[in-house]
Structure formats: structure tokens, C-alpha cells
Image (cartoon, rainbow, N blue to C red):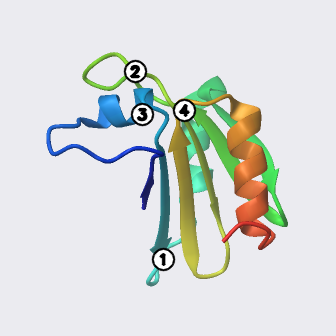
Amino acid sequence: MFYLDAPLGPEMTRSDFLMTGGVIYEALRMDGGGPFAPSLFALGDRAIPVQVGEYQGALVWADPTEANVRAHGLYWADSTTNYALVAVRGPEYLLNMGRGLACGLLR
């Protein structure tokens, strides 16, 4: 899901969306796979272990987009679903939002 407090234009790129303040939220069923967050620790110090509610997560400083925009990403999983939040916001912002989602405070 894409969240933005303005209309999405047909020519808006991912970089435009992120720089305009957009937030990407994904919930992807594992379907027999495992949690995605632990694999991100191979990125070294760009992936920091964090608690997202009762779940282990990873906070990541992303690679630049085609327009050199760098977002933060927060990744965690419950027993059936991998979750991701991506935005050009401070890491504390994403972590607080992710914790609100994981604890059912945000819907």
C-alpha cells in the first residue's frame, strides 16, 4: 500500500513518491518461506536489529534510488507474514510506526 497526502500522479516515480513524503507499507504472506528481516543483517552496519512489538526486526538504510533518494526501511515478521515500511523519514519515525502496526495501534 502506498500512503501520500496528495494524489499520485501517473508520471510519479518511486523517488518522487518518497521525496514527497510517501510511505510504502507491505504485508506479504510467507507461504512456506521464512522471515525476511534476518537476511538483511548480511548488509553489515546498514541493518540494525530492532524490536518491533514482540518481533525481531531490521532497520535498514536503503540503497539510493535512480534519483539518488535514500530511504529507511523497517522489516519484521510474525508467524505468517513479512512486513515492510519504507519512507524518507527518520529511523525513529519508522520504528514507532512499525511498533504501532505490530501492536495493533494503527490500522
The crowd level at tag 3 (other Cα within 10 Å; few <14, some 14-19, many 20+) is: many
Q: Nearer the viewer, mark 2 or mark 4?
A: 2
The crowd level at tag 1 (other Cα within 10 Å; few <14, some 14-19, many 20+) is: some
Q: Which residue is mark 3?
A: 18
Query: What element does badge 3 sit on?
Result: helix
Query: What element does badge 4 sit on?
Result: helix
Foreground pick, 96 / 9:
9
Foreground pick, 75 / 104:
104
- Residue placed at 74% from the left, 67% from the top? 102
Q: Nearer the viewer, mark 2 or mark 1?
A: 2
Tell me, yes or no, whether the two marked residues, 2 and 3, touch with CB atoms within 8 Å.
yes
Q: Is residue 14 left or right of residue 57?
A: left
Q: Which residue is mark 4?
A: 43
The crowd level at tag 4 (other Cα within 10 Å; few <14, some 14-19, many 20+) is: few
Q: Residue furthest top?
A: 68
Does 41 appear above or below 84? above
User: For the residue marked with disc 1, what is the amino acid?
Assistant: Met
Q: Which quarter of the image is occupied by the C terminus?
A: bottom right
Q: Which mark is residue 30?
A: 1
User: For the residue marked with disc 4, what is the amino acid?
Assistant: Leu
Q: Which mark is residue 69?
A: 2
Q: Position of residue 41 (x, y in %)?
A: 61, 40
User: For the residue marked with disc 2, what is the amino acid?
Assistant: Val
Among the two numbered marks 1 and 3 on one chain, the one whose residue lies closer to the N terminus: 3
Q: Residue furthest front?
A: 6
Query: What element does badge 1 sit on?
Result: loop
- Residue placed at 68% from the left, 28% from the top? 90
